[in-house]
Image (cartoon, rainbow, N blue to C red):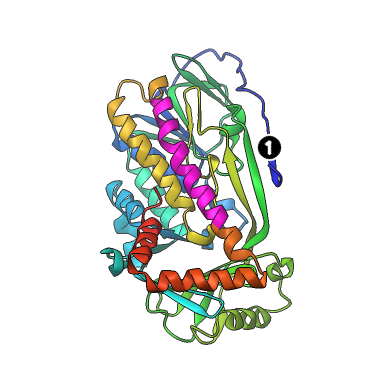
Amino acid sequence: MNDYHSHAVGQVQQSQQPSSTQSNAAITVIGGGIMGALTSLLAAQSGFKVNWFGPEESDRTDGAGARNYALSPLTVDLLKKVGVWAAIDSSSCKVAHMEVFTAGTRVDLSATDAGAEFLSVMVLHQDLLNALEQAVQFSPQINRIKARPDHISAGQEESKVLYNGEIFATQLIVGADGARSWVRQQSGILWGQRDYRQYGVVATLQTEHSHGGVAAQWFDQGEILAFLPLAHPNKVSIVWSTSREDVRAPSSALEFQQELEKRSNHRFGGLTLISEISSAPLRLLITEAQSALRTVLVGDSGHTVHPLAGYGLNLGVQDLLSLEELWRAHKDDPGANSLIQRYEKSRRYRVRRVQWGLDMLQRFVSQSHPTMSKIRRWVMQLVADIGPLRQFLIRQAISPQ
């Protein structure tokens, strides 16, 4: 692959044998963030004892706590199921309408066109993580260990997790530890990535005009700018996919605000920066597989996508829903080879379809050639004029399966 970098890693390390085996659990989850917490809660609710390894995220310095997620209806339903939605509902914002702009053309996407209540719900990362962590504290099935293990060793009958001189026997290891997954490395799963040569710039702004629960997105000059409404009627989160490194460190907040006002055609009036500006390089991560012996990967440890459609966390939730369905049929051994194979088969096509679909969309909307601009305008007008096509796109956005 021309602009992909493949990586091969070593196999699972065999650990030394401590004097005792303790704290066994059917499922071991590794990864201290949102996916780790959500996986642990769902596994516990499915009737399994869980060891959840992973450091707390309070020490992160990448601005993750101030980021916002666009949760799909299926993700909201899962959060309700594990009992955390009530804690974040009041601080969330439903997005029922989205405006998309490119080359002087506008398309309106409305949840009502697809018979849905909303397109997505905006939730702050830190609010969601706090609610999940609190729910874990009230689950007697979950043993929380706030550190990463030292080694993992997968076997045909069971796996072993070594931490601090103690062996934890388990039937299934779930890697929920992000794009730089240690579990993926330890399990010998091959992976590759495509660098988009862009940064995802994230910030929170106060708007002059109320957003009214409307999200807006602009495809312009090879870049993508999204305004996402927050719970406060005059606050939005922006996600700007840009190749300009200087955007990450503007000479002044005023300069940053003025640039965004110009690019958004003053859709929400004047803007005031009310947060730090954070950014991260945008990459498409592809794994050879989402599983290995008694091991599965969920969320960013198994795949990443371009943020232009907000699919990241929602795609990880789809992994969990697939696992939950299989757990119901494998109560005795959630790490059985038949389950692993079925999980791999169920996720491979769906994940690839979303990854490559968004990758092609990113290439399509990021080309700045005049001919491509004309084609985008024509396609956008087609979507605006054809109701069934628009409804299909909305359904795909609501449910990334």
Magenta residue check for 181: no
Residue at (66, 73) in percent of width and height: 370
Classify residue 51 by image quadrant: top left
Q: Is residue 44 left or right of residue 316?
A: left
Residue 168 locus on image (x, y percent): 47, 22
Q: Is residue 325 above or below residue 23?
A: below
Q: Nearer the viewer, residue 375 or 241?
A: 375
- Label 1: which residue? 6
Residue at (42, 20) in percent of width and height: 337
The N terminus appears in which quarter of the rendering?
top right
Classify mark 1: helix, strand or loop: strand
Callout 1, which amino acid? Answer: Ser
Whether residue 229 appears in this view of the structure is no
Residue 47 locus on image (x, y percent): 29, 31
Q: Nearer the viewer, residue 240 or 393?
A: 393
Magenta stretch bounds: 339-360
Q: Is residue 353 above or below residue 30?
A: below
Q: Is residue 79 above or below residue 296?
A: below
